[in-house]
Image (spheres, grey):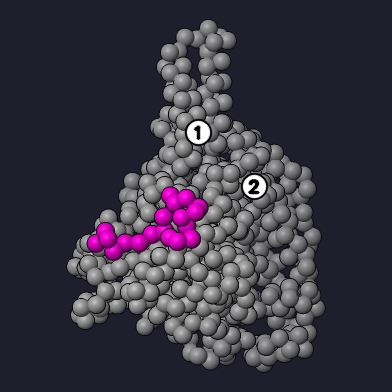
Amino acid sequence: MLKSNIDKSTGFEKRFENINTVVFDNSTSASVAVAKEIANLIQLKQENNESCILGLATGSSPKGLYAELVRMHKEEGLSFKNVISFNLDEYYPMEPDSINSYVRFMKELLFDQVDILPENVHIPNGTLTKEEIADYCAGYETKIEALGGIDLQILGIGGNGHIGFNESGSLQNSKTRLVALDHITRVAASSDFKGLSNTPRTAITLGVKKIMEAKQVILMAWGVGKSNIVKASVEGTVTNQIPASFLQEHKNAVFVLDKEASSKLTRINTPWLVEKVVWTDKLIRKAVLGLALHLKKPILMLTDADYIENGMSDLLADSGPAYDINIKIFNKLQNTITGWPGGKPNADDSHRPERAEPARKRVLIFSPHPDDDIISMGGTFMRLQQQGHEVHVAYQTSGNIAVADDEALRFASFVCDYNEKFGIKSVEAENIYKKAEVFLKNKKASKIDIPEVRYLKGLIRKGEARSTSHFVGLPDEQIHFMELPFYETGAIEKKPLGEEDIQLTMNLIEKIKPHQIYAAGDLADPHGTHKVCLDAIFEAAKRLKSNDFMNDCWIWLYRGAWQEWGIDEIEMAVPMSPDQVLAKRHGIFKHQSQKDGVVFQGSDAREFWQRAEDRNSETAMFYKELGLATYAAMEAFVRWEY
């Protein structure tokens, strides 16, 4: 039975949940726990001379699981010789050697690294003719039935609640079949295929019926981006609009979650509705601000009755009356607002988010991609520069995979035209252009770019980033291009964070000796680059902690393009006027390759400048609704203590 070190909830505390849920501190510890569950089952079957029938999933969720199973095989001798596997799904049409095929995914992450017998591996065939699919799918189910069914089925969950590729509307008795993919599913996958137009429209999937017949089901979900659909699946009604909700009727199903994916569950998001809680300052702030927004009342208008009628009578009894609590929370929220993100000189800073001294700070802004700085904290970036601080910006990766192929070709063509116009003879430039042209014209949708094309794309983004920094007012010596090695694979899938990435980060911090570091805490980034970049900064900061200059260094985390901080989390809010919002927009527009058809759009159809403005405006609106001053927009930050 899966157990978590941090999740000690009783059945009473879980009474809103209709599926067993286990919450872990992070996806790594959760993946290790699931791997142990699988290993125990495999070994039990081995002791009984039986085959172990596993249903396996692909996608980002099980990557850590497969890595741990591989480790257990190599270091602990876990054998897979008695394992027979059936994968959930495959895109259609799809060649098995394509970089996006699930055959390749499974071979690279698991099968080629363990001793499973090749004849025991089953993955839906994406190369069939449509006429062959029906018989093939029936045969796939027959094989499972002949083996006595699936012993343990691993699942992820889609943003619309799909399991496998059983999209919204799938019936509980649906069989293995060819399905049309939902637009939401295709948009979510489009980053892997470098654009929606290249993303398959159909897939072969194991039906819901076979999933429900599995003896045990473990569904894994990581990250805040899955929190809403997890809540709907676990606490909502059973509906074919959310196929994962069918698991409420399974006799042995469990949702394995990290803290972020579980964050909207009632017992975690509003624990005072479930059990008696210890009212910490953080919990009081979360409860009061949530109550005010729920009731659409300013903080100072909340009454004793509001608290009592919404499950907060304990708080009222401990710290009331409501007026006293309201004033305390109102003042704390008001103190987060500052027009001086670098600290206001010659001012009382006891209630300000940043220190007054030193009046002129060295500031280091880390930007995972070449546009995250201006998108997520452009207003603060400009204000820091305008207020006289020594601002440095560090672009952690080249961002080259986010440049469309035609942009790279246009750039190479411009260089050739430039040389011809000014009589510059460059055979090398001509050859690079011709090589890139031939490659791109014959490139398969899933093929990795050749180095020359990657360099071209990187130069485009480098030029745009430099243009943005010049627009803000930075000189070249305060613009740093790190090109962290983990990113430079030419593919969506990156290398793990390495020692060289950490050392490069440490070297830059040591060189600048900043009083402030700004880093992207926007972990809903769909291709994970933000997480790796943030881990590099965190590890560098921990290793440098003993240095004297780090005693004066505060680290602020920003968000923006993919998500925003909750109103109860914000520790510094930097307001922006309409003119400042417009200036930020113009800074974002310097990134022309990321306008009008972004390669990695995610599930949000708006352009990045629109997302940023809407989020900043929404943050300001929350402050207004809570009874504070009205601003056009606000950028929000949370301080990280190390």
520 vs 537, left or right, is right
- Residue 430 percent across, percent down from the top left: 46, 16
At x 56%, y 88%, the residue is 15
Give the SS element for disc 2. helix
> Mark 2 is on which residue type?
Phe
Residue lying at 37% horizontally and 65% vertically, measured from the top left: 86
Q: Is residue 605 visible?
A: yes
Q: Is residue 3 left or right of residue 78?
A: right
**Local secondary structure at mark 1:** helix
Between 460 and 91, the one lying in front of the other is 91
Whether residue 370 appears in magenta in the rendering, the answer is no
Asked if marks 2 and 1 touch (Cβ < 8 Å), the reply is no
- From which residue to which does the magenta span run? 117-136
Q: Quadrant of residue 313?
A: bottom right
Provide the residue designation for mark 1: 457
Residue 260 screen position, x and y as percent: 52, 69
Q: Is residue 612 visible?
A: no
Q: Is residue 485 above or below residue 88?
A: above
Query: Residue at point 61% right, 73% down?
Result: 240
Which label's residue is closer to the chain start, 2 or 1? 1
Residue in the image at 22% along x and 67% along y: 81
User: Where is 254 relative to 624, above or below?
Assistant: below
- Mark 1, other Cα within 10 Å: few <14 / some 14–19 / many ≥20: many
- When the figure is inspected, residue 587 is found, relative to residue 223, above or below; the finding is above
Q: Which residue is mark 2?
A: 608
